[in-house]
Amino acid sequence: MKWDLIGVISDGIAVLGLGDIGPKAAMPVMEGKALLLQQLVGADIFISVSVANVLTEAMIQSMNQDPIVFALANPNLEITYEHAMEWGVRVIATGRSDYPNQVNNMLAFLGIFKGALAVQATDINDEMKMAAVKAVSELVTAEQIERGMVIPNVFETDVTNDVAQAAIDSKVAQKIPSLI
């Protein structure tokens, strides 16, 4: 059976299948780092909000070349930033502000609300959220991506205008200001 998504929790692995058994299906937790190592062989991406230091050098080395790791446990990551760089991780994202690629809801959160308020939107819909995502993604340059930077700095992000325009375009805006 092939798994497309493997969820890691503090006791081990909670396997969530998107392939053969359909979405939202789950298997019991499989315990131990040995099983995690087995699951990471040939993986491209590891995304986790679990516990500190769950990833080892052997696990990273078993992944495909230039692996991507979103280590989002806070404040202590599944792998230290320093180990990730030393062991060959191409891109590491964390929830911490003292490392590059900080995953933070501030990237879009404030701009979504400012944009919605600017046009007195009756709803915050998918179009507005996607406008925020697109605006954030466009802030990252090709040069930054080459250096492993895939998430912009939270203080250099403003998606307000994009969200307001999406509200107007999707007809949930009650007010159209002259300058957004």
Image (cartoon, grey):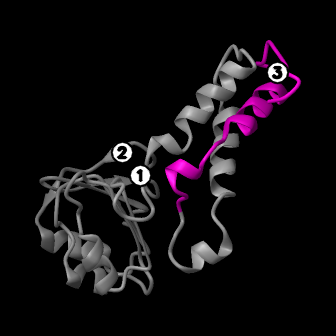
Q: Position of residue 23 (x, y in %)?
A: 45, 45
Is disc 3 surrounded by few (<14), some (14 to 19) or many (20+) residues within 10 Å? few
Q: Which mark is residue 21?
A: 1
Q: Is residue 101 above or below residue 154?
A: below
Q: Position of residue 85 (x, y in %)?
A: 34, 81
According to the image, label 3 marks what residue?
A: 171
According to the image, label 2 marks what residue?
A: 25
Q: Which residues are magenta?
A: 151-180
Write the residue at 43% across / 62% down.
4
| Front in this rendered view, residue 67 or 94 | 94
Picture quarter containing residue 31?
bottom left
| Front in this rendered view, residue 133 or 26 | 133
Q: Is residue 161 left or right of residue 148?
A: right
Q: Which secondary structure lies at badge 1?
A: loop
Distance from the alpha carbon under mark 3 to that under mark 2: 36 Å
Q: Of the residues under marks 3 and 2, which one precedes in the sequence?
A: 2
- Decide if residue 62 is in sight here: no
